[in-house]
Amino acid sequence: MHNAAFAALGVNSRYFAFEVEPVNLRAAIHGAKAMQFAGLNLTVPHKLPALNMVDVLDESARRWGAVNTVHFEGRTAEGDWRPLREFGVPPSGGKRKPVPVHDAGVPGEIRTVGFNTDADAIVTALREELKIKLPGAKILLLGAGGAGRTAALKLASENVGELYLVNRTRSKAEVVAAEIAKQFPSVRVFTDYPRTAIDLVLNATSLGLKPDDVPPLDEQCFCMSQTNAVYDMIYRPAETKLLAAARRAGRKTANGLSMLLYQGAKAFEIWTGRPAPIPVMRRALQAAVQSPESAVINRGRKIK
Ligand code: ATR
């Protein structure tokens, strides 16, 4: 999706995937800095360790406790930190607008800034795909691992009305519930299935990635007809058992592809300083996810 977006906007950049062992993460970030990369994305299992490996944490990374996007900045002769794209001579021609060039193209020093674009992507995806109005909404959130915790805190920050946190290991849901009670006291938070009609079921567990997984929702405890919509953070398979059951029950559904899209779009904007061409990125993403080649690189993990 990034390469399609670069091509569409005439940005002379390329996006590559590298497999990095956790023990090499710090060296990999330093290497990218030395090579004057514009930025990085990080995924499982690097998002938490990276908090201690970047020079500066953006408010988003500090708030959500994870880094999924890194931006490299250079120091100008005046001592300001500016994106690396503003150093060096811009290529002539192309669609790119001229940018200010600092220090004859050589940054005095480079620093890494860590961002989190995952949390906002959850909210954008729910709004765009399912037209959910979050303030006051009643939501059943399945999962209290890394992805579930971020989703719970982000939804609470959007002033949802009631949040039901259900997790196989109940104690983890209780820890997240306590965190919400402290930080967002106006949100009513429970660690049980709801007994009333709700707006949304959101799956943040990994159940559904494998064909023989049981659905994450226990329909003995909560009937599909009690929710208006279902979102599954998993995007491959495109339709999990949970989403199939929701569709059969006539509920609105969406999978995690939109979360992947919006976290990427935000990262693109951080790196390039330009609005992300969302339709281009969406089309490229759909094609990539459906191609058999991508199954090797990306094993269908949901966003973390
Ligand atoms: P992520 O960062 O993707 O959330 P994680 O932190 O390992 O990954 O969390 C995985 C989530 O899926 C957790 O909510 C986990 O439940 P536990 O906290 O009880 O481990 C849930 N999960 C994974 N396998 C499961 C299973 N077989 N049954 C029920 N829940 C499961």
Image: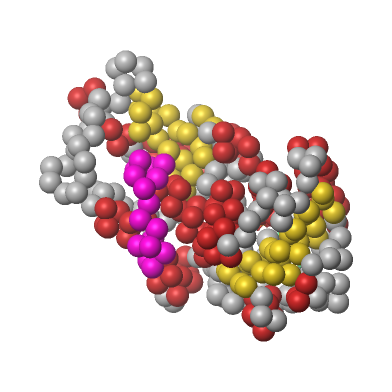
At horizontal 59% and vertical 53% (from top left) the residue drawn is: 123
Quarter of the picture holding the N terminus:
bottom left
Instruction: Please tell me which residue is depicted at 74% across the width and 59% down the height of the picture.
Output: 139
Q: Closest to the observer: 204 or 298?
A: 204
Residue 20 image point, x, y percent:
49, 51
Quarter of the picture containing the C terminus is: bottom right
> Is 95 placed above or below 79 here?
below
Residue 282: say if magenta: yes
Judge from the rendering whether residue 89 lies leftward or rightward of residue 260; answer left or right.
left
- The magenta region covers 269-284
Residue sitting at the far left: 93
Query: Where in the figure is residue 271, as x and y percent of width and height?
Result: 38, 42
Q: Residue at x 78, y 46 (%)?
A: 187
**What colour-coding does the image apply?**
secondary structure
Farthest residue, direction top: 78
* Percent coordinates x, y for residue 256 in the rendering: 57, 64
Residue 117 image offset from top left, x and y in percent: 52, 47
Q: Residue at x 86, y 77 (%)?
A: 220
Question: Compared with residue 84, is residue 141 higher up or lower down, i.e. above or below?
Answer: below
- Residue furthest to the bottom in view is 248
**Does residue 174 appear in the picture of this structure?**
yes
